[in-house]
Structures are given as C-alpha cells and as structure tokens.
Amino acid sequence: MRGSVRAPRFFSVPLKGRHGHPGTYRPSCKPIAVLALKARPIQFMINAPYRWAAVKAARPLRSIDLFNDFSLSPCLLKAVEALGYTEPTPIQQRAIPVVLQGRDLMAAAQTGTGKTAAFALPLLERLLQNPAHQRSPRALILVPTRELAAQVSDACRVLARHLPIRGVLIYGGVSAKPQLDSLSRGVDLVIATPGRLLDHLQSRAVDLSKIEMLVLDEADRMLDMGFIRAIRRIIAALPAQRQSLMFSATFSDEIRILAKSLLRNPVTIDVSPRNAPPELVDHSVYHVDTSAKHPLLTRLIVDGDVQQMLVFTRTKHGANRLAERLVRDGLSCAAIHGNKSQGARTRALDDFKQGRIRVLVATDIAARGLDITELPHVVNFELPHVPEDYVHRIGRTGRAGLRGRAVSLVSREERERLRAIEKLLGRPIPVAA
Ligand code: AMP
C-alpha cells in the first residue's frame, strides 16, 4: 500500500466547534515493535515540585530528557512534536516508562503538570502495540466532570491523530444518540464521566468486558463528587486482569483505600508537594467588605487591563449574579456551573479560550481540571468551603511554565476560611498592597 489512507476519525462524537480532522494513517507510521526500555539507569527527580525552570536547571544526569528516550512509536512522537512539547514534564518522565511496562500506577499530580499526556501517550502506545481483532473498548478513562472529559478527549484526539484508533467521549447533559451510534460502530477507547457511562452499561449499550487499561483521573474529585458507588459498579464490569492507573491531586486516606481495592502492586509517584500552591503563582489576598468586592473586581480588571480572568464563586446563583453585574459594567463575561446546559458550558468555555469573552465566572466543580493555556489571572471572589479547593483553583494559572497571579477577595465572614487555607498551606498568604 502506498501513500496515505484515511483512518477512521478518532472521536466520533466531537464537541461542537472542536471537530478534529480525520487522522491520516500512513504506512510509514505503522506501529513498530516495542523496543525494550533502554538498559540504563533512569534517575528521576523524586518529589521535585513542578517548576519548568528548575526542571531544566536541575536536570539529573542520565534522566529521560526527550520524548525520543521513551520507546514510543514514530506516529506518537510526531504528534508530540507537532504539539511543541520538547521535554517530558516530571510526571511524564516518571509515569510513561512505568505504564509502558504494564505496571499499575498511583500518581499524585495536580492538573497543570502534564498528567494527561503522562497517561495518554503510553496508553495509546499500548493500544497500538496489541491490535485487537474486534472493535470493543480496550481502554477506559474515567474523569469527574464533563469539561475535563472534553479536555482529555481533545488531548487524546491530538495525540492519536496519526493512529488508527477510535475513541468516544461519553458524558451526560447531551443527547445519548451520537454516543450510542459510535459505540455500535465500535471504539477502542472510551473517555467518560461515571453517570452516563453507567446508563450505557445498564442498557447494555457498552461492553466493558474487554477493557485492558483503566485510568481514573482526578480520583480525589470523583470521591468528593460522590461517584464512589458508580465507580465501583463500573469497575465490577471490567475484567480483573487489566492495568489500572489512578491520578489524584492528593493522597487522602480515602484515596488510599480506593487504590488498594483497584490497583495491583502499583508504582507510586508523587510529583506535587502536598497542598502546596503551584510554584509559578503569585497569590495574595485583599481584605474587603462583601459589598465592595464587585467594584474592586471591576477595578482590578479595568485598571490592570486584564484580558482574561477566571473568577470563582461559591454558588451557582452567585456565579450568575456576578456575571450579570460584570456585563452591566461593560465587561464581556459568562458564567459556567452545573445548572447550565452542556451546550452553554461548552460555548462559554470556547468563547473564553478564544478570547471572545474576558471574564469567566465559575464554580469549583465546573472549573475543575480546566486547562486554559496562558491564563494569567485567577480571582477567588469568595473563598472555597474546602481548603484543598484553594490549591485547585489557583492551579488554573501558572501552568506550563508561565507565571500566574491569583487574588482572593476575603470578607470578614471568610477570615476563618482563610485561616484554614493558610493552615493547609503551612504559611500565610501575603496581603495585597
Ligand atoms: P495537564 O496537566 O495534562 O492538564 O497539562 C497542562 C498543560 O501542559 C496542557 O496545556 C498541555 O498541553 C501542556 N503540556 C503537557 N505536557 C507538556 C510538555 N511535555 N511540554 C510542554 N507542554 C506540555
């Protein structure tokens, strides 16, 4: 066979506005045999905080410096190169060889560390190396929110653009029909939130009995969102013989219990110091009356000529109200939360990513896992109930080596909450001048 032939589109249920081009499967990109990992010691930067400058400066001798050092197929390396990734991040350095070896993995990594590619690259490689005769799902990635599902799906689609691998994105709040159509045509990879996947499982629209690899992403948030029973029911439908990977921002006792029941003799990797704010974020607080928060926020945006800001509120109602007030101030703005339809959430996120709106007001769950490139400003209009959410929130900025700024507007009633966050961080948050 000469030249290139069309491969089936990787994601048959793309999100609106995210239609990927059908991948092209070139014979030159055919999977090659897995080469054994190079027989040289691999030294990792244990517990190194994710800090790109530091990664470069303190690069250990004989570390995995380049993606070429992993035994990945040329098609995957080509996709990595097209993304502009030159060096693997610490989680990628450590997780990719482990997953390629077929080991189970328990990884503590915050979002923003490059964890998606850390599991997606070896997962795609393994799917490629062991082609199946029939098309029933062989890998399952479970994530807590629709936005994260869409993001992970986008990342997989881009990485798999030269591979003959088909995936489906499954989440609730949208019509099930396109998902069912894709499932009946046959897919290799399923990326799903637990609720809708369970619906498909119960109606026998999906068969998970051939799953070889399971990824549980943001496992801590899955538990916070009450998905534990759904997860257990989904896992019961998987074969016992499989490879399982679990990613979590923190290793709480609950997470360890889940890991024990899910993983077999896992390799444990921790690339993020527990409950530390991302290294590249300057964070500060303004002590301010509740009634003065909105005018202060508008001033911060206008006077600072801020072009993109993600603002967190505690409640859905609060998010709507604030978005309306900012629009009245003449700022382009949208709110994103669980009561919005999936269409509205996707549209708001796209508008924000494309720079069509300046301010995105979000609740914690809606914003979890959002990866918006080069987001320089995050504001906590209200502090979160759960101190750990502070770390997740400000982790939206300071990503991929860029500096970020996070500001919290703290009223008198929220002082207790601020103290809880500072206790968790083990240091006070500076007061803005
Ligand atoms: P994640 O933690 O998976 O949400 O990734 C955070 C961001 O880092 C995403 O925008 C990725 O595209 C980007 N990223 C992941 N790996 C690399 C890498 N090796 N080099 C540069 N950027 C990366």
Image (cartoon, rainbow, N blue to C red):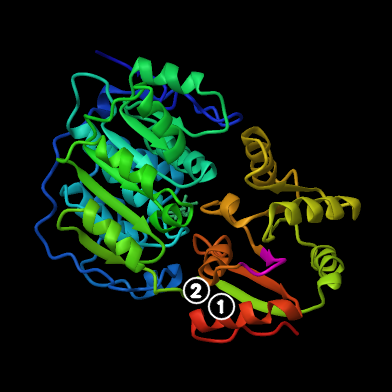
In the picture shown, does residue 129 fall above or below 429? above
Q: Is residue 144 visible?
A: yes
Crowd band around label 1 with a 10 angstrom C-alpha radius: few (<14), some (14–19), many (20+): many
- Indicate whether residue 12 is drawn in magenta: no
The residue that label 2 is drawn on is: 279
Q: Residue at the spot x=23%, y=27% of the render?
A: 30
The residue that label 1 is drawn on is: 421
* Of the image marks 1 and 2, the number of the one nearer the N terminus: 2
**The C terminus, quarter of image:** bottom right
Question: In x, y percent, where is residue 232?
Answer: 31, 45
Question: In x, y percent, where is residue 415?
Answer: 68, 81
**Amino acid at pointer 1:** Ile
**Amino acid at pointer 2:** Glu
**Nearest the eye: 229 or 211:** 229
Ligand 1 within 8 A of label 2's CB? no
- Which stretch appears magenta? 378-384
Q: From the viewer's perspective, is 6 left or right of 149?
A: left
Q: From the viewer's perspective, is 430 left or right of 427?
A: right
The reply to whether dot 1 and dot 2 touch (C-beta < 8 Å) is no
